[in-house]
Image (cartoon, rainbow, N blue to C red):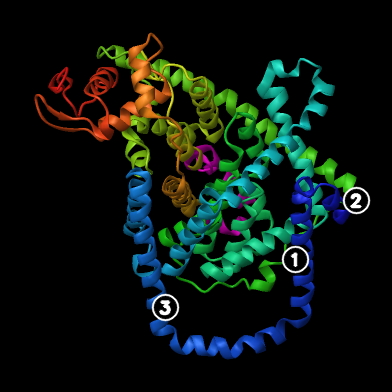
Amino acid sequence: MVIAACALNFHQALPLFVITVATIFFVVWDHFMAKYEHRVKELLSPGRRLLDRHWSWLKWVIWSSLILGVVFWLIFDTAKLGQQQLVSFGGLIVYVILLFLFSKHPTKVRWRPVFWGIGLQFLLGLLILRTGPGLMAFQWLGNQVENFLEHTDAGASFLFGENYKDHFLAFKVLPMVVFFGAVMSMLYYLRLMQWIIRKIGWVMLVTMGSSPIESVVAAGNIFVGLTESALLVRPYLPHVTKSELHAIMTAGFSTMAGSVLGIYISFGISPAHLLTASVMSAPASLAVAKLLRPETETPKITLKNAMKMGMSDSRNLLEAASHGASSSISVVAHIAVNLIAFLALLSFVNAALSWFGNMFDYPQLSFEIICSYIFMPFSLMMGVNWQDSFMVAKLIGYKTFFGEFVAYEYLSKLVDLRKGSGPKFVDGVQQYMSIHSETIATYALCGFSNICSLGMVVGAFTSIAPTRKRDIASEAGRALIAGTIACFITACIAGILSSTPVDINCHHTLENAFASSLSQNTTDVVSCCQSLLSSTVAMGPGEVIPGGNHSLSSLKNCCELLKPSTLNCTWIPDQL
C-alpha cells in the first residue's frame, strides 16, 4: 500500500513513507538487540576499553571544542541577528549560577546531567527552530495535531447542538480533553505509549547519566500529566531516593500533558512551539533537578525494573477508549472549576488592590502591575526586550498564581491583537508584544509549575507512596521552584535559537507611514522605529546620527511616536 501510494503521488505520501520506514527500523532494531545485544557489547568492548584509558585527557578536548564551538556560533549568530539572542544566553548562564548557589548540596553536584540536559535542549531546539527540515517537520506535526483535535467537533456538535461554539470554552475546548484522553488510553492498551516512553527515557539515561526511574518519568511527562507519569512507576516510588523524588516532581512541574496542549492550540498559540517546548522541557527538568538537589544516596531501582511499566487494565480496545474518556471527567471538571474560581479571585483581588491604591491616589494598582515588577527581571533574562518585559512578567504571574490555563488565555488575546495589526499603544498603554517575545512567553509558560499544582502533587504522591509523606512535603516546594526555572531555561534556549524574520523594508515603511494619513502606530512601524532608535548615536543637541542610513525626519517622527527615555527628541535637528 505504501509503495502504491508513493507511485501515485510521492509528495502526498511522504509522511506515510517516513512513518513506515521509522516503524520498520525500530521493530527490526528491537528484535536485533533482543537477540544479539551481548554480541554487540563484546564487539564494541575493545573500543570502550580504549576510550576509558584515554578518557582522562580526551574529555577535556571534547568539552573545550564544544565550548569554543558555542562561543564562535554565538559570535556569528549575534553579528547576523542582533544582540537579543546574546541576552538570552546570558540569562541561561545566570539561571545556572543561581541554581548552583541555592543548591541543597553544592559540593555534590554532578555536572554531566546539567550540561547534557542543557545540551540536549540546545540540540533539539537547533534541529527544530533553525533547520528547514526540522521546522517543517514540527510545523507539519503541529498542523496534524490541530486537525486531529478538530474531530472533537463531531461529538460536541451532536451533544450540544450546532451552536455549541457560542460557548467556545465549555463546549468546544474542554471536549478535546475527553477525546485526547480516550486516544491516549487506547495507545496504552496497544503498548505503543510505553514503548515510546522507554525509548526517550533510554536516550536521557545514556546521555545525561540520570537514574532509570528519573529518565522514565521525565519521558512520560511529555505525553501525560504530572500525577499520571508517577503512576508509570508506582511500585517503585516508595523506594526512590530524595533526589530522585525531587527530580520526579520537578519533571511534572516543568512539562505539559498532551491532553491540555490541544486546549492551548485551540486558543491560537503556535502548535509547533507548544510541541517543541513540551519535548525540550524533559531534559531541562532533570538538569535543573540535579543541580538544585544533587544525588547523595545510592539509587536502588535498576534499569530493568524501571523499564517495566504498568500495562492497561482494559480487556479490549473499546473498553480502553471508554475508560480513557471516563477518566478525563475529573480533568475537565478540575479545569472548569479552577477557571471559575481563579478568574473570580483575580477580579476580587484587583478590586481590592484598586480600593487600597485609591487611598494613595493610585487606583490603577492591580495584580498585573505587581506581577509585572516582580517577574520583570526574569523575563528580561530570558531575552525579552524592555518594552515587552512587563507584559511577559504579567503572564508569568498569572501562570504562577492562577495556572498556565489563565496565562495562555491572556497570551492568546495578545496574539489576536497583534495579528489584527491595530495600534500598538492606546492611551499610552501597550496592547500587544513582538513575535519574538510571544515565542519566549510560549516556552516560559509551558509547564504545570503553579501554586494549584503544588497541592495536587502533594496529595497525589502521598496517596501513591504514603510512607514518603514527610519527604514529599519537604521536597515539593523546592521542586516547584526547580520546575519554574526549568521552564525559564527552556525559554532562554528558545530566545537564543528563535529568529523572527524581518520581511519589511523599514526605509519604505517609515517614509510611507509618516508621509501619509495612515496609522503610524502599527506593529511594523513600531518595530522599525525601535530598530532605528537602538542604532542611533546621540552625542548632544544637534549632534545626532540616525542608524541604518535613515533620514532625520524618520528619526524625529519615531522619537515623537515612542518617546524613548534614552534619547532627547529635542536634540534631533529638522535638517542637516
Residue that numbered label 1 is attached to: 26
Residue 92: tell me if it is visible.
no
Q: Is residue 64 above or below residue 148?
A: below
Q: Earlier in the sequence, mark 3 or mark 2?
A: 3
Main SS, magenta region, reads: helix
Q: Residues within 10 Å of mark 2 (few under 14, many from 20)?
A: few
Q: Which residues are magenta?
A: 444-472
Say which residue appears at 42% left-offset and 16% top-offset: 423
| Furthest residue toward front | 576
How far apart are labels 3 and 2 at the CA level? 51 Å
* Measured Cα–Cα span from mark 1 to mark 2: 25 Å
Residue to which mark 3 is pinned: 59
- The residue carrying mark 2 is 316
Instruction: Residue 272 in the image: state x and y as whole percent.
Output: 59, 42
Q: Earlier in the sequence, mark 1 or mark 3?
A: 1
| Secondary structure type for disc 1 | helix
Let me know if residue 147 appears in the view. Answer: yes
Precedes in sequence: disc 1 or disc 2 = 1
Q: SS at mark 3? A: helix
Mark 3: few/some/many CA within 10 Å (<14, 14-19, 20+): few
Residue 194: say if magenta.
no
At horizontal 72% and vertical 81% (from top left) the residue drawn is 37
Q: Are marks 1 and 2 in contact (CB under 8 Å)?
A: no
Amino acid type of disc 1? Phe
Residue type (three-letter) at the residue carrying disc 3: Lys
At x 88% / y 48%, what residue is drawn?
317
Residues tagged 1 and 3 counted as in contact (Cβ below 8 A)? no
Viewer-side label of 1, 2: 1
Front residue of 339/373: it is: 373
Instruction: Name the amino acid, label 2.
Output: Asn
Question: Which mark is drawn over residue 476?
Answer: none
Question: Which residue is drawn at the image coordinates 47% and 34% (left, top)?
Answer: 438
